[in-house]
Amino acid sequence: MTTIKQLEEKLELKKLTDGGEAGTEVKDGCVCDLLSWVMARGEEGMAWVTVQTHLNVIAVACLHDFACIIIPENIEVPQSTIDKSNEEGITIFSSPKTSYKLCCEMYDLGIGK
């Protein structure tokens, strides 16, 4: 089992939000930027890697009770998105790494196996 706190530490992520529980289990991963695809296939406990940063990502994360959202390549996240994620208890992380690298590292941690 990997928690979002362990994910944060092992992937060297920067937490952008106050929301979420550090002990929340990351059960699987997802990398996709097409929200309708994620809405149709998302599952509870996923860590979602996406370049999308608008408010709708929070709605999709809440819909499936995702463990967290990870924004790659240090893409700037609007304050309105951060505020909404804090309101909903969704953790958003940022990373300088590419989506590909983040997914490889999550898989190496046993996420998605």
Image (spheres, grey):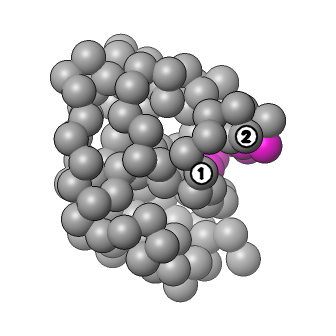
Q: Evaluate if marks 1 and 2 touch, with contact meaning CB atoms under 8 Å apart.
A: yes
Up/down of 111 relative to 16, above or below: below
Q: Residue 39 at what x, y percent from top left?
A: 71, 32
Q: Residue 28 at what x, y percent from top left?
A: 65, 59
Q: Residues within 10 Å of mark 2 (few under 14, many from 20)?
A: few
Q: Residue 26 at what x, y percent from top left?
A: 56, 56
Q: Which quadrant would residue 36 be assigned to in this image?
A: top right
Q: Residues within 10 Å of mark 1 (few under 14, many from 20)?
A: some
Residue bearing mark 2? 37
Task: Identify the mark nearer the N-term, 1 or 2.
Answer: 1
Q: Residue at x 62, y 34 (%)?
A: 35
Q: CA distance from mark 1 to mark 2?
A: 8 Å
Task: Name the amino acid, label 2.
Answer: Trp
Residue bearing mark 1? 32
Q: How many marks?
A: 2
Horizontally, residue 38 falls left or right of residue 97, namely: right
Q: Is residue 87 magenta?
A: no
Q: Which residues are magenta?
A: 41-46
